[in-house]
Image: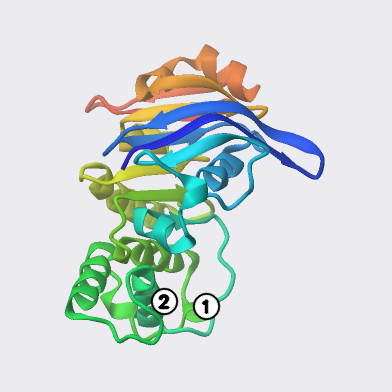
Amino acid sequence: MTIEAEKLTIRRLGRTVLQDVSLQINDGECLSIIGPNGAGKSTLMAGLLGLIPAASGDVSLNGAPLGRLSRREIARRVAYVPQIHEGYMGFRVRDVVETGRYAHVRPLDPLSEVDHRAIAEAVEACRIGDLLDRTVDTLSGGERQKVWIAAALAQQAPAMFLDEPTNALDPAHQAELIRIMRHLAGGTRTLVVICHDLNLPIALGGRVVAIREGRVVLDGGVEMLLDTARLRELFGADFVLHRGEEGGVSIQLRV
């Protein structure tokens, strides 16, 4: 799935929050979006999905203009896991994962064998088989995030968008979600992830785009995150690199 934005501008409450963004996300690419709070990262993702109207500019999915696609057609192309989920609290996990097939099933039609197979594969990939009969409100934050990702996987869309998927999770659940995302990044899906933690793009590899004040200011490989002067310019803070014995690198805020 190739996703392209050309001179995309979005205004909210009279303020320009995204300005003339042109971006092409290639088929099968893993793209991490970084930037300070309020930079426009989530707005960009929502704009690429048509969830927020554009003041000007164009977005296309595999060459099809976004404005000509129905919500169902968009959902067949891109699965989306937002930062904040509302609803589903009283639903069983199995019912939530089944919602991932709604883009493929007509209203009131039963799920087919193909649908059940897609759901089973998503449940297995996210390792949530033991949670299926629990309700969402009884789950921890990390467990809920795996359920949302499983529902997105069940869509079997060629692209997946994740908005800060590891935010506010404990280390164990972060590691589990990174495992899932690495699996996705190594497959055929186009994967776009908004990252709060700068170590997540390093773990995923691929390409990084940095947003500041509603504009793309950096676009390149993850190795550019190893330039602490560049990070200081982007975030207005100092960072230090830690290199492990096996060659791995982590980024830490200098306090």
Q: Quadrant of the N terminus?
A: top left
- In this view, 111 is above or below 37: below
In the image, 140: left or right of 255?
left
Q: Amino acid at mark 1?
A: Tyr
Q: Is 157 or 38 nearer to us in this picture?
A: 157
- Report the residue at 17% width, 79% height from top: 113
Percent position (x, y) of residue 89?
54, 79
Q: Which residue is mark 2?
A: 96
The quadrant in which residue 92 appears is: bottom left
Res. 132 mark: none
Q: Is 20 or 214 nearer to us in this picture?
A: 20
Classify 10 Å Cα crowding around label 2: few (below 14), some (14-19), many (20 and above): many
Label 1–label 2 contact, CB within 8 A: yes
- Considering every residue shown, the one lying at the far top of the view is 229
Percent position (x, y) of residue 171?
42, 52
Q: Amino acid at mark 2?
A: Val
Q: Secondary structure at mark 2?
A: helix
Percent position (x, y) of residue 21?
56, 27
Compare marks 1 and 2 and give the one earlier in the sequence: 1
Q: Give me the C-alpha separation between circle 1 and circle 2.
A: 7 Å
Q: Which residue is mark 1?
A: 88
